[in-house]
Every structure is written in C-alpha cells, then in structure tokens.
Image (tube, helix red, strand yellow):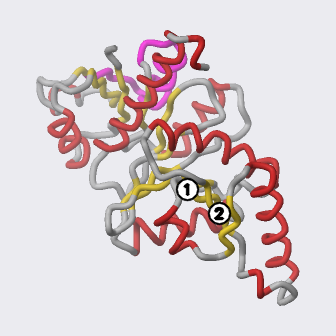
Amino acid sequence: MPVTVGLGAASPDAKILSTIRAVGREIDLILFSRPGTAGTFGDAVTVVEAEEPEVALIGALAAGRIDAAVRGTLPASSTLKALKQAAGVDRLERIALLETADGHLFLLAPVGVDEGWTVEEKVRFVKLGRDIARNFGLAEGVAILSGGRLGDLGRHPVVDRTMADAELVARLTGAEHTEILIEEAAKRYGMVVAPDGVSGNLIFRTLTLLGAGAGHGAPVVNIDKIFVDTSRASADYTNAIMLAKSLAESKKSRIGHPSSK
C-alpha cells in the first residue's frame, strides 16, 4: 500500500540531506521548498518549489495529493497557521513520540502550552493516544501525572487540584494516576499525560534538549489529515517521516476494512 509523504525543506541543510539519504527508496518522499533550490537536493527526490512552501505543503495535504506531511525545517508559526486554516480548527493538539536515553519509547501529551488544561482535554488525549500506542506496539497502559504525591495533599491548592484532576481522568478512562513520578511512568507505560501543556512542554524539552533522549515527531490528533510536527532539536527527520508513513498506512487499512473502525 504505497504512501506519499511531504516534507518541509526550507533549504538543503544537513538535516534534510541526511533524511533523504536515510529514507532512500523506502518511501515516496516529496520536498516542499523555496524557488531555486530543487537542484541542490540531489536527483533521488521530488521537489515542489513555491514562494510559500508551507502553504504548498498544507495545500497538497488538504487536497489529498500527499498522504501525510512532516513540517521539517519550515517555520512553525506560518506552517501551523496554514494547517489550522485548512483544517478549520482554532488550535492544534499534538501527541509526541519520545525516546528515553535507554531506548524506551512512549507517547507524551499535552506538549503545546495551551493544551490539556481541562479534564475533558486530558480524557480526549488518553483516548487518541491509546490508538497510536497500539499501532506502534508500545507498552500497555496510560499514566496520568499530577503535581505531587498523594501524601502532599494540602501543601498547595494548585497541587491539590492537579491530583484531583488526575484521579478523575484515571477513573473516567481506566488509566492510572502515577502522581508526580515521571521517571517510573515513562518506563512502564505506553503513554504519559502531563498535568497541563506547560509541564508537558517542559518534560519534552528537558528530555530532548538537556537530557540524552530523543523526539520522533508529534502527530496532530484533532484533524482528519496526517501531519507530524517536528522539533528543531531532531538530528534529522527520518523517524518523523516513518511515523507519518505508519499513521498513513494505518488510516488506509482502516478505510479498506470498515469493520475495523
């Protein structure tokens, strides 16, 4: 079942060239870049040139000319703005695929600072994340983090509220409230839900920018198209492309087998 993935490539920098070499012939890859750059990427890849490559990338995704898109090195602000407009949503919800220093993979949400502030949002992340975790064969179960241990109740009202919310989310979804113990949750569970978008973003940054972990892309989960956001901390975009490819294959499989929906 062939899959075509579009990759944003602001310029032929080392990350893009490394990605092209790594992906090779495994996937139908199309680069979206600025005018005058096509010849600098080599002959093994198709390049679409546009004055606004982010608009061209999102337009191709919306029109179905590509099965999935990866932001790559295109600017976050204009690319995500174009995606929101095309999808008709006022914000984007993402679930990041992360890897610890010892090679353990897990999903993390929320990772956007404006995401995951309500119980309803966290419940939705749990439901969407379970499907992704199942597709990738990640560990069973979902961990809901809070701002402290249960023994810390009463020390601060904000901490108390995070624990109450975590208990409720766990009860509503069948997940487990693992308190503040991120170090245990990341090793044992396929998905970890942070108390809010700020703490989730800090976890992501600490693991990938200060620690020895890695980020493999963050699929947007509240739209009907497959778009994987990426971090500038990534060594290249190979893993994000393979993530997008896997999601697209899974989507095609579901469409082909309605009984599996």
19 up-or-down from 27: above or below: below
Quarter in which the C terminus is drawn: top right
Q: Is 151 on the left or on the right of 135, as rendered?
A: right
Q: Nearer the viewer, residue 6 or 226?
A: 226
Farthest bottom residue in view: 155
Residue 167's x, y, as percent? 80, 64
Residue at the image point whose x is 64% and y is 43% from the top: 93
Residue 89's x, y, as percent? 71, 32
Give residue 105's quadrant in the image.
Answer: bottom left
Q: In the drawing, what numbered circle is on residue 108?
A: 1
Residue at the image point whose x is 45% and y is 48% from the top: 138
Residue 174's x, y, as percent? 72, 51
Question: Is residue 62 part of the magenta span, yes or no?
Answer: yes
Describe the element under mark 2 as helix, strand or loop.
Answer: loop
Q: Alpha carbon of mark 1 to alpha carbon of mark 2: how far? A: 7 Å
Q: Which residues are magenta?
A: 47-66
Q: Is 30 on the left or on the right of 66, as rendered?
A: left
Tell me the amino acid under the disc marked 2. Answer: Ala
Residue where numbered disc 2 is placed: 194
Lower position in the chain sequence, tag 1 or tag 2:
1
Q: In the drawing, what numbered circle is on residue 182?
A: none
Tell me the amino acid under the disc marked 1. Answer: Leu
Q: Is 155 on the left or on the right of 238, as rendered?
A: right
Residue at the image point whose x is 66% and y is 34% from the top: 222
38 up-or-down from 124: above or below: above
Q: Are marks 1 and 2 in contact (CB under 8 Å)?
A: yes
